[in-house]
Image (spheres, rainbow, N blue to C red):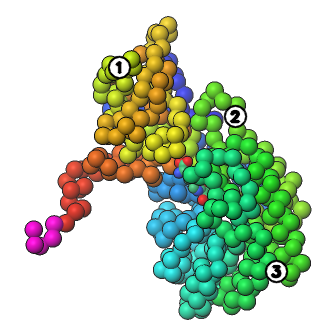
Amino acid sequence: MDHFLYRNGALFAEDVPVSEIAAAVGTPFYVYSTATLLRHFRAFDDALEGMDHLVCYAMKANSNQAVLRTLAQAGAGMDVVSGGEYLRAKAAGVPGERIVFSGVGKTADEIRLALEGGIRQFNVESEPEMIVLDRVARELGQVAPVTIRVNPDVDAKTHAKIATGKSENKFGIPIARAREVYRLAADLPGLKVIGIDVHIGSQLTDLAPFEQAYLKVADLCEVLRADGHEITRLDLGGGLGIPYERTNTAPPLPTDYGAMVKRTLGHLGCEIEIEPGRLIAGNAGLMVSEVIYVKSGEGRDFLILDGAMNDLIRPAMYDAHHDIVPVLEPDAGAEKQLYDIVGPVCETGDTFARQRLMPPLAAGDLVAFRSAGAYGAVMASEYNSRPLIPEVLVHGDQFAVIRRRPTFDEMINRDTIPEWL
Ligand code: LLP
């Protein structure tokens, strides 16, 4: 559920008409709902009630400072995957003891940054990374808390580009080699092994692959304990999917997920961490765009928008579906028609939807892309020298620009011309 609803035919973000934001900031832009962000965070937090747990928001989904601060104030931890994300989390007020560091390619500098600034744990993904972490920790006179990410070889049944838990993926260590790698880690004085980490993919719409992976983690936990390791924490990753198409049967809810976690892992008495990104931020955001032209092509009509693939890459990159809705509903009875919905970028891939049934639209009309709060703004680029679009946060009847649109001068002046030119 989100807080983008129609009132008398006009789309609202909480208590603010979306058209009012468009008039104030210009299109295209992203708009996020505080109430939806908090609702989704709390859904996970409540789902794990009764177990010692921390919900570490995967901030790669949406790392705007205002979004992070909103969640941090509600008690969220953060899952970070780079030095930049680590610093963003700290800047938003997240204490080091609530930050977990994931990722297959942490550099020595990033590791040092996190050790110096404080960190809850590193989710280590390989033996060479372990060696570097051990060295840096010892140089700093510290012992780094770690979980080791295992690759359970489970098919997450999601888009190939976002599945991470099969043996051929670059992530984690093969679960079959876990005992050997835990033994190696236990011998490194700069590390303290405290747990197991697993993340099998993103946009999972079925609990079965999670359950398969978590059962393997439960078995591994017992085996490692029998080997003498003190396993007290399980990081279960993120990945629970959202309903991109409202017509589909809804994916499982955080409560279903939480019940499954309790069923598969509850008996181990471990502290549980989860790293949801998409489910917290996805349906908490819209991308709003204006129709520039309606163009009649060969056997089809194109809606040419001022938003493009550089602003929201998911359709081009993953063939992702986003519901696209009018900001002002047309009169009841207006006959719907089919459009190809595209942006102005010079690539055929700059297509948001093909043959989408929409109410009749004209130049100047506003449309909203739903489910654009996760992996939207963070994946945007300035391709075609299109400025990054602004982000707006709504809270009740208030709204604020939380990242403004850069000026063309700012964009151009980021480049420097060498002396010889
Ligand atoms: N933890 C780890 C280690 C991850 O790699 C990810 C996502 C998450 C947590 C959060 O997963 P979520 O709950 O958001 O599914 N750009 C793609 C999604 C990439 C996901 C990468 N890793 C998209 O737009 O669909």
Between the C-alphas of marks 3 and 1, the distance is: 67 Å
Which is closer to the viewer, label 3 or label 1? 1
Between the C-alphas of marks 3 and 2, the distance is: 40 Å
Left or right side of 383 for 156: right
Find numbered disc 3 in the image and state the secondary structure of the residue it sits on: loop
Residue at point 44%, 34% (across, down): 352
Counting residues from the start of the chain, the first of labels 1 and 2 encountered is: 2
Q: Which mark is residue 196?
A: none
Residue at point 77%, 58% (across, down): 213
Foreground residue among 277 and 347: 347
Q: Can you say whether 313 is above or below 327 in the image?
A: below
Left or right side of 238 for 317: left
Counting residues from the start of the chain, the first of labels 3 and 1 encountered is: 3
Counting residues from the start of the chain, the first of labels 3 and 2 encountered is: 3
Foreground residue among 373 and 299: 299
Within the image, what quadrant is residue 56 found in? bottom right
Residue density around tag 1, few if under 14, some if 14–19, many if 20 or more, within 10 Å = few
Residue 415 x %, y %? 22, 63
Report the residue marked by disc 1: 298
Report the residue marked by disc 2: 250
Extent of the magenta region: 417-421
Report the residue marked by disc 3: 229
Residue 411 x %, y %? 25, 55
Looking at the rendered structure, the kind of residue marked 3 is His
Between the C-alphas of marks 1 and 2, the distance is: 36 Å
Q: Can you say whether 140 is above or below 251 in the image?
A: below
